[in-house]
Image (spheres, rainbow, N blue to C red):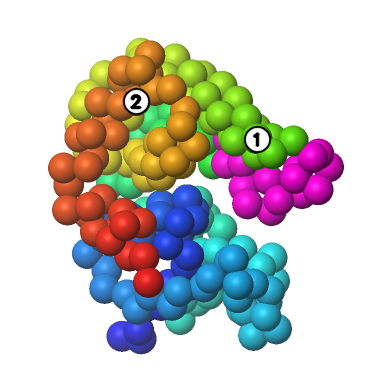
Amino acid sequence: MSEVVLYDYWRSSASYRVRIALNLLGVNYKAVPTNLLEGAHKTPDYLTLNPQGFVPTLVIDGKTLTQSLAIIEYLAETRPECRLLPSDIADRQKVRALAYAVAMDIHPICNMHVATHLMTMTDKADAREAWMQHFIADGLGKLEAMIAGAGGTFSFGDAPTMADLCLVPQLYNARRWGVDLTHLKRIVDIDARCAELPAFQAAHPDRVKP
């Protein structure tokens, strides 16, 4: 079996999601740190691997995969023994909706390249922090309402799914930017429950920081 290689950046939410997924599946991988602050994602070699110049990139099963949720869905479909996605099609839609609410509605507008561009458009020193706090808080408030009606001890059911793989990194970012989480009781409880699991612990940015 060929070596599994993950090109990631320790603080990247998208990379964090994939690290959790690989850990839950028990897939051993070689990590290749790709420092976004130093422009490692813009080198010709990396752009050949991932033309978007984003992280993560996962080399597995003889394939080069990009986009974190597409990677996680590939893992879920090729390794169904770990229920990253439920077997029922309606339940899969619910989990995808929760995951996409983070990965497609919160994350893109709070990404590093977006925030960096924002700072070229204003001279307000606190603009980046205010931007992050506004959009993360708004998105998580909506996610709390979506999750509130779901039963189980995690975002959907009694085992981690793709929804939790997106939630936990976003909570890490929320705390990093000083977002008030006191009213998001369900989300905070789920995050704490995930933090008890070795797969989540091993993927934490503080554990993988170069």
Q: Tell me which segment is drawn in magenta.
A: 105-123
- Name the one closer to the observer, 78 or 119: 119
Residue 33, located in which quarter of the rendered image?
bottom left
Mark 2 lies on a secondary structure that is helix
Outermost residue, right direction? 121
Residue shown at 20% from the left, 34% from the top: 193
Dot label at residue 89: none
Q: CA distance from mark 2 to mark 1?
A: 27 Å
Query: Residue tagged by mark 2?
Result: 187
- Type of amino acid at the residue the image marks with label 1: Asp
The correct choice, above or below, for 6 with respect to 54 in the image is below
The correct choice, above or below, for 53 with respect to 5 in the image is above
Quarter of the figure with the C terminus: bottom left
- Type of amino acid at the residue the image marks with label 2: Ile
Query: Residue tagged by mark 1?
Result: 126
Residue shown at 31% from the left, 18% from the top: 185
* Residue 87 position within the rendered picture, expressed as x and y whole percent measured from the top left: 33, 40
Lateral position of residue 113 relative to residue 182, left or right: right
* Residue 100 position within the rendered picture, expressed as x and y whole percent measured from the top left: 53, 37
Residue 110, located in which quarter of the rendered image?
top right
Residue shown at 49% from the left, 56% from the top: 12
Specify whether residue 120 is painted magenta.
yes
Mark 1 lies on a secondary structure that is loop
Quarter of the figure with the N terminus: bottom left
* Residue 44 position within the rendered picture, expressed as x and y whole percent measured from the top left: 70, 83
Crowd tier of the residue under label 2, counting other residues whose Cα lies within 10 Å: few below 14, some 14–19, many 20 or above: many
- Name the one closer to the observer, 189 or 121: 121
Lateral position of residue 12 relative to residue 128, left or right: left
The correct choice, above or below, for 156 with respect to 99 in the image is above
For residue 87, say whether it is visible.
no
Crowd tier of the residue under label 1, counting other residues whose Cα lies within 10 Å: few below 14, some 14–19, many 20 or above: few
Residue shown at 24% from the left, 59% from the top: 202
